[in-house]
Image (cartoon, rainbow, N blue to C red):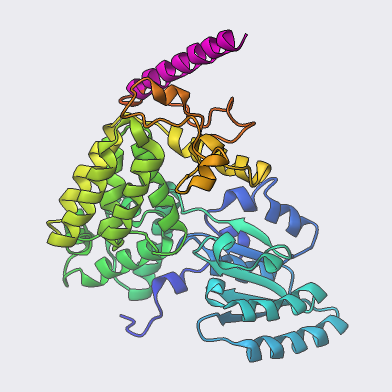
């Protein structure tokens, strides 16, 4: 039995694009990479996809397909000096009619200055850049570099594709280790489901199970996988794509009134290591932005949940966050205050420094009173009908309505009160008009 073999995922790497499994949307029919190769071209590309979807393999095969001088670097260890050397080599190759391909793994690890340095060689054509990243290029790659490279979005492999890969792997294991072992279909099915589209994870699991099979046995069964499938790594990155996707799903679940989905996404984030106080802060914001005065107590409950977590910590305090999430999801919703806030900000930018109406100006001195500061103002506590007389908006804005309450929850009561105020104001205005005439 061989003992010093490289990992199965490496040994099973396809030798041509015809052997490559997955990414049909790019490589088959009218896929843009298929059309690019058919024209004999290779442009700079950013491969964006999850682990184990074939980014490195695809880059290697593309370079081979156009007979390019291929170089692989990792952004974790490479620097500007490495790029400079390859760019010089690329210029020499161009004079010989040879394309030079740089495959830069984990390109998102390059800082802005390093990415800036890549621009020149890529723009002049001395290097064809094939970058690989698991993070959204919109957040991790500078705009000028993105404009010079097309983003190829790679998908996790389908279960059927992983099963096909595992069938090949089973034959390779038997040949490499010279041991006749039958791999049951259920084993393949369970590994394919557990791998979640990650080919490398699937192959590592199968090889580990194969090597751990006791001497004398010739059949790999589902029970043999149990020790290997106890835990499942959760896909998450505290400042990247999954972070933004999952917090978005959490907020939108509450906005849609779905407490089950809200609890699910909250727990997904917490289980993956998200800061619970970050989730609490987003719920406080949600209480104002999406619930507002439809359920005014929502804001206090969200603040209380944060305080409860700060008092109890994890895991006990996380239940308070869950309680708040369920309440926020099921509470009546209104973004009327949020919309009113935006309308007012827009108005201020448009109309500028409108003067404060005399009626509501401060009049602490006799001189200011002589100038009509505060004239006509009566404290509403002293005259219940008086609020309708107060005109606090600047002249020219008095017919505008910024806050428009909905009919949801407590805002229905607010809407009735405002309508009553408008009615009284209209009656007073009509009465004053009659008295003047």
The residue that appears at 12% across and 56% down in the rendered structure is: 316
Question: Which quadrant of the structure image shows residue 314?
Answer: bottom left
Query: Measured from the top left, where is residue 420 in percent x and y?
Result: 40, 16
The residue that appears at 52% across and 56% down in the rendered structure is: 21
Task: Confirm whether the magenta stretch covers residue 383.
Answer: no
Q: Magenta stretch?
A: 412-437
| Residue 68, placed above or below residue 356 | below
226 vs 338, nearest the viewer? 338
The residue that appears at 27% across and 32% down in the rendered structure is: 330
44 vs 400, nearest the viewer? 400
Residue 363 visible somewhere in the drawing: yes
The residue that appears at 34% across and 38% down in the rendered structure is: 254
- Quadrant that contains the C terminus: top right
| Residue 100, placed above or below residue 303 | below
Query: Measured from the top left, where is residue 409 in percent x and y?
Result: 31, 25
Task: Confirm whether the magenta stretch covers residue 416.
Answer: yes
The answer to whether residue 70 is left or right of residue 188 is right
Residue 313 visible somewhere in the drawing: no
The rendered magenta stretch, by its main secondary structure, is classed as helix
Question: Which quadrant of the structure image shows residue 350?
Answer: top right
């Amino acid at each position: 039995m061989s003992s010093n073999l490289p990992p199965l995922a490496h040994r099973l790497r396809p030798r041509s694009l015809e052997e490559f499994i997955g990414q049909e949307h790019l490589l088959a029919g009218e896929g843009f990479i298929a059309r690019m190769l058919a024209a004999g071209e290779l442009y700079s590309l950013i491969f964006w996809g999850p682990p184990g979807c074939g980014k490195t393999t695809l880059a290697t095969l593309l370079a081979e397909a156009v007979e390019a001088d291929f170089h692989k670097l990792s952004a974790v260890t490479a620097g500007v000096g490495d790029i400079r050397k390859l760019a010089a080599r690329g210029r020499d190759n161009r004079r010989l009619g040879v394309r030079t391909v740089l495959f830069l793994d984990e390109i998102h690890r390059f800082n802005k200055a390093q990415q800036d340095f890549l621009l020149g060689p890529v723009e002049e054509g001395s290097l064809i850049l094939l970058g690989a990243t698991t993070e959204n290029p919109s957040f991790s790659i500078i705009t000028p570099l993105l404009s010079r490279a097309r983003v190829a979005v790679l998908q996790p492999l389908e279960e059927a594709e992983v099963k096909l890969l595992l069938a090949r792997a089973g034959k390779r294991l038997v040949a490499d280790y010279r041991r006749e072992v039958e791999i049951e279909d259920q084993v393949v099915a369970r590994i394919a489901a557990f791998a979640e589209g990650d080919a490398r994870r699937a192959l590592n699991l199968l090889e580990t199970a194969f090597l751990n099979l006791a001497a004398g046995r010739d059949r790999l069964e589902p029970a043999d996988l149990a020790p290997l499938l106890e835990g499942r790594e959760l896909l998450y990155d505290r400042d990247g794509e999954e972070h933004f996707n999952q917090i978005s799903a959490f907020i939108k679940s509450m906005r849609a009134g779905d407490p089950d989905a809200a609890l699910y996404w909250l727990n997904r984030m917490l289980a993956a290591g998200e800061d619970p106080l970050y989730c609490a802060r987003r719920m406080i914001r949600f209480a104002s932005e999406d619930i507002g005065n439809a359920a005014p107590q929502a804001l206090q409950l969200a603040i209380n949940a944060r305080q409860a977590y700060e008092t109890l910590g994890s895991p006990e305090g996380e239940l308070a966050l869950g309680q708040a999430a369920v309440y926020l999801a099921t509470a009546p919703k209104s973004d009327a205050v949020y919309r009113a806030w935006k309308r007012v900000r827009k108005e201020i930018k448009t109309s500028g420094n409108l003067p404060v109406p005399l009626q509501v100006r401060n009049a602490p001195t006799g001189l200011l009173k002589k100038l009509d500061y505060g004239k006509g103002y009566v404290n509403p506590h002293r005259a219940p009908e008086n609020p309708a007389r107060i005109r606090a908006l600047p002249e020219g804005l008095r017919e505008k309505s910024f806050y428009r309450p909905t009919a949801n929850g407590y805002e229905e009561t607010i809407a009735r009160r405002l309508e009553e105020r408008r009615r009284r104001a209209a009656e007073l205005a009509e009465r004053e008009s009659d008295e003047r005439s």
